[in-house]
Amino acid sequence: MTGRTRAPGASRLLASAHFLVWFTGEFFRANAVVLREVLTPGHGIDPAVIRVRLRSRSMVEIATIMALISLTPGTLALNLTTASRGPLLTVHGMHASDPEQLRASVQEMEDRLLACLRRPAPAEEGVDP
C-alpha cells in the first residue's frame, strides 16, 4: 500500500469519465443494432417489457436513469412505481430476446450512474489502493 491520497471528489470525477466513455460506447452500439433493423426489417425485433427494482433514491438519480434509458435507442422507460422496497421501473426493450440480460444491463447502467452521482464512502475517498 502506498498511502497516496486523492483530492476529494477525484474518484467521482474518474467514475464520471468512465461512465461517459462506457455510455457513449453503449449508445453507439444500440444505434448500430437499430440501424441494422432499419436496413433489414423484421429480423431482430424481439420486444420485452421488464421491471427493475432501482437502488436510486433521489429524484435526480431516478430522473437521470430514466432519461438515459429512454435516450438509448431500442429502450424506453415506461413507468415508475414507488413502493416501500424502493422504486420499480418498467422498461421496454426492442431487442430483448433475453429479458434477464436487459434487466442486467439496466442495473449495470444504474450502478455506473450512481458511482458518478453519489459521494464515495469516507474510507474509499481518501486512500488510493
Image (tube, rainbow, N blue to C red):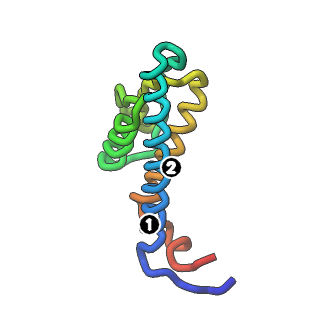
Residue drawn at x 53%, y 19% as measured from the top left: 44
Extreme residue toward the right, this view = 1
- Packing grade of label 2 (10 A; few <14, some 14-19, many >=20) is some
Quarter of the view holding residue 103: top right
Report the front residue among 90 and 102. 102
Please provide percent x and percent y for residue 119: 42, 65
Neighbourhood count class around disc 1 (C-alpha, 10 Å): few under 14, some 14–19, many 20 upward: some
Drawn side of residue 41 relative to residue 81, left or right: right
Who comes first in sequence, dot 2 or dot 1? 1
- Specify whether 2 is left or right of 99: right
Image position of 124 with respect to 82: above or below: below
Residue 65 image point, x, y percent: 38, 43
- Location of residue 5 in the rendering, given as x and y in whole percent from the top left corner: 53, 84
Label 1 sits on what residue type? Answer: Arg
Q: Residue at x 58, y 21 (%)?
A: 97
Extreme residue toward the top, this view: 42
Which residue is painted at 48% across and 43% down in the image?
Answer: 26
Residue 12 rendering spot, x and y as whole percentages:
44, 66
Q: Which residue is mark 1?
A: 12
Residue at 47 percent across and 67 percent down: it is 14
Label 2: which secondary element: helix
**Element carrying mark 1:** helix
Where the C terminus falls, by quadrant? bottom right
Name the foreground residue: 108 vs 60: 108
Residue identified by numbered label 2: 111
* 63 versus 75 height, above or below: below
Q: Quadrant of residue 74?
A: top left
C-alpha span from label 2 to label 1: 13 Å
Quick one: quadrant of the N terminus? bottom right
Which amino acid does the dot numbered 2 rest on? Asp
Disc 2 vs disc 1: Cβ atoms closer than 8 Å?
no
